[in-house]
Amino acid sequence: MLTEARTPLPYVSESRRACDRRPAPGYWRRLAPLLALLACVTRVPSFVRPLWNPDEGYLAVQAGMLAHGGRLYETVVDRKPPLVPWLYEAAFAVFGSGSLTPLRVCAVAAQLTTALLLASIAHRRWGPTAGRTAGVLYLLASVGLNPEDAQAATFEVFMLPWTAAALWCADRRRWGLCGAAVACAFLAKQTGGAVLVPVAWMLWRCGTPRRDLVRCAVGAALPVLAVALATDPAGFLFWTVTGSGAYASFTGSELHVLGRGLTNAAILAVACAGILPPIARALRVSRTGCGDLWLWLGSSAGAVLLGFHFFGHYYLQLIPPLALLGTAALQTLPRERLGTALLTSACCCALFVTWGLLAPRPELAHAQRVAQEVRARSAPHEPVLVWGMHPETYWLAGRRPATRFLTAGLLTNYSGGRDGPQVGEKYAVAGAWDVFRAEFATRAPRLVVDDSRGAPYGAQRTRSLRRMLAPYEVVGDVDGAVVYVRRG
């Protein structure tokens, strides 16, 4: 009933009283352990598999190459910024490269940090109950995707604390730190820069003087500039911004890609079943007064759409603003709705955690069998080439790649099931084939595995690679992956 609705507290930037709210003594001492326990429980499935998806494999191989003298954006390349590869490299340097468990622990810490920042924002705006609600809702929804997307220790998981930190700093008008957080979000993954939209809106709404705008801009620019100078400036610009035109295209397998997008959106909607109804109800009852949060959600949705691939892990970016909007909505509804929202979210979370514990991983099993064959037919010091979309094979086999291009996608534009007209050599990253041929000529691999398994980028459908395989002979087959060994 509308008469039972509680009056929403005003938006923080419009109420000095809301801005001055401080946690009661012991508030964080009680809340932080609860959120830490919840973060650990929700991510238990991440520890039951040696590897969850090819992105983890790519990062693991990159870290190994960097540890052995590779240079990012020169002899080690990817379309991603460097913070997460550097994190993997640091973890391997301290704990060894044989397991991703230290990175799984880092992912738990990242999710906990995000939850604490969201709780702090909600507490400041709506009070202690809202702080607890925001942190719990976020962690319960954070695993609400296919386990290979939600449980992996990859780019989005390490990007989210920085996006939340940007809103936290903007909420407190610490504009220099806010800009730095935006920069770090971008340096974890490019789409993290979408948080700049709500930050800019908050700057405008607060009527800050020019010096605050300058502080934010300088805070955002300096880390990016420092990273560019620490790597290769031209390579950094190319690989993270300008070199992905063909990749970020909707052409090719439109129905397949659209189906993936709708499926992942439906999965996330199930995970947020406790959050979405209060938001919808609050919109009908009253204004929530959360323009910055709606902009955060909208810019994050735009980031999901960017590139037209709709992978499940892209949707993780939507969960922090949804958790805060759900918390804001619950402030306007009868108190019993809070218990319903938390119970629904907990049940959905249990469903996804069970899925993560029990779901089979056939692609991982295939990569492990191929890696076993690679180990059997090559020596540890011999470079090998795995022509496919599973770079984790190198890491599982303990072999170094013969090229800087760890997937066939960089050389053919094949990605995520795209099998339309924009797959082939002419759609490769600019200049990639010249570099690939030179590497193949100077460091010819002992072993080549064509792991395309009928995909349109297969060796027999890629003219240049077919010519390069002329000195090789077929010696085996592993679940459709063809194994070549150099004659003599």
Image: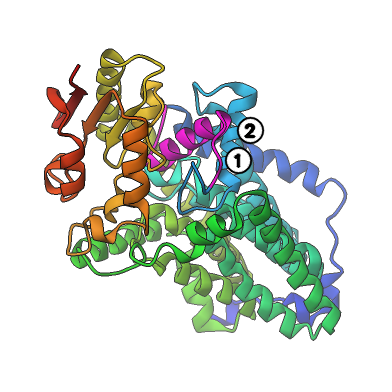
Q: Is residue 386 above or below residue 236?
A: above
Does 345 sit left or right of 454 as displayed? right
Marks 2/1: CA–CA distance: 6 Å
Q: Nearer the viewer, residue 358 or 5?
A: 358
The one of 314 and 425 positioned closer to us in this rendering: 425
Residue 321 shows in this picture: yes
**Residue 17 appears at what percent x and percent y?**
85, 75
Q: Dot 2 corresponds to which residue?
A: 90
Q: Residues within 10 Å of mark 2 (few under 14, many from 20)?
A: some
Mark 1 = which residue?
86
The amino acid type found where label 1 is placed reads Trp
Q: Position of residue 41 (x, y in %)?
A: 54, 35
Disc ID at residue 140: none
In which image quadrant can residue 287 be found?
A: bottom right
62 w.r.t. 345: above or below: above
* Residue 53 drawn in magenta: yes
Q: Quadrant of residue 369?
A: top left
Measured as percent of width and height from the top left, residue 350 is found at 43, 41
Q: Which residues are magenta?
A: 49-72
Which secondary structure lies at badge 2? helix
